[in-house]
Amino acid sequence: MAWETHWKKHPTVRSGDQLSLGEKAADKMRNGMGSWPFVFAFFAVMITWAVINGILHVGGGNGFDPYPFILLNLFLSMLAGIQAAALLIAAKRSDSVASEISLHTETTADDIKALLQTNNDLTSAVHDVVVAMKSQTDMLQEIHRHVEALSPGAGTSTPPRA
């Protein structure tokens, strides 16, 4: 399945040798029984069973599974019981994967919040330095104007550039 392969790409979802035998089996059952090939194979077996048994019944024979296909009903009942357990196991495995992903998301969100706070602190510090430099430049220009006004050749020099 396409979504199953994406789990393996997630950095915190365990895969391969990190999985227990039961987890590997749950993944295989989920991928097998929850697929279109399984559904088509199931229908092919059911149709084949009915056709072969029907052909054997023609002409008064009993076939290998007398009508109403008691053996087939037994197999279908067993399959339903196994599939119910397989669905529960697969759901439990999916919950485990979702839990691993949500823990990673929470940790990542906390890391991002810390980085944003650091970024805000640095931006504030840079802003404070820029404001301080601007006020120093303004003070220097003010001092220069006062000195220029008091000097004998007032108005002939140009103020320094900021």
Image: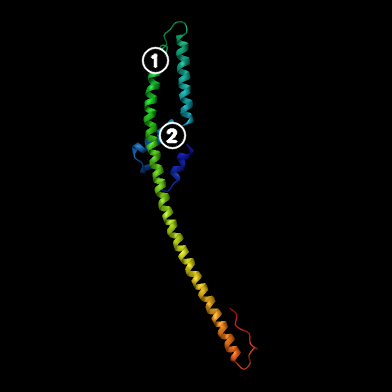
Residue 3: x percent and y percent?
47, 39
Query: How many other residues sit within 10 Å of disc 2, few (<14), some (14-19) or many (≥20)?
Result: some
Question: At label 2, which amino acid type do we have?
Answer: Asn
Question: Is 159 left, or right, of 116 in this rendering?
Answer: right
Query: In the picture, which quadrant includes the C terminus?
Result: bottom right
Residue 81: x percent and y percent?
37, 26
Name of the residue lying farthest toward the top: 60
Mark number for residue 25?
none
Q: Secondary structure at mark 2?
A: helix
Residue 94: x percent and y percent?
40, 39
Q: What's the residue at 44%, 46% (across, down)? A: 10
- Quadrant of the rendered image containing residue 152: bottom right
Q: In this figure, which residue is indicated by the disc labeled 2?
A: 31
Q: Secondary structure at mark 1?
A: helix
Q: What's the residue at 38%, 22% (across, down)? A: 77
Q: How many marks?
A: 2
Q: Earlier in the sequence, mark 1 or mark 2?
A: 2
Q: Nearer the viewer, residue 35 or 150?
A: 150
- Relative vertical location of residue 87 with respect to residue 99 in this rendering, above or below: above
Q: In this figure, which residue is indicated by the disc labeled 1?
A: 70
Q: Nearer the viewer, residue 87 or 13?
A: 87
- Relative vertical location of residue 129 with respect to residue 18 in this rendering, above or below: below
The alpha-carbon separation of the residues under discs 1 and 2 comes to 30 Å
- Quadrant of the rendered image containing residue 90: top left
Question: At label 1, which amino acid type do we have?
Answer: Ile
- Quadrant of the rendered image containing residue 115: bottom left
Name of the residue lying farthest toward the bottom: 152
Question: Of discs 1 and 2, which sits in the foreground?
Answer: 1
Q: What's the residue at 45%, 21% (across, down)? A: 45
For the question of whether residue 14 can be seen, the reply is no
- Relative vertical location of residue 129 with respect to residue 140 in this rendering, above or below: above
Residue 91: x percent and y percent?
39, 36
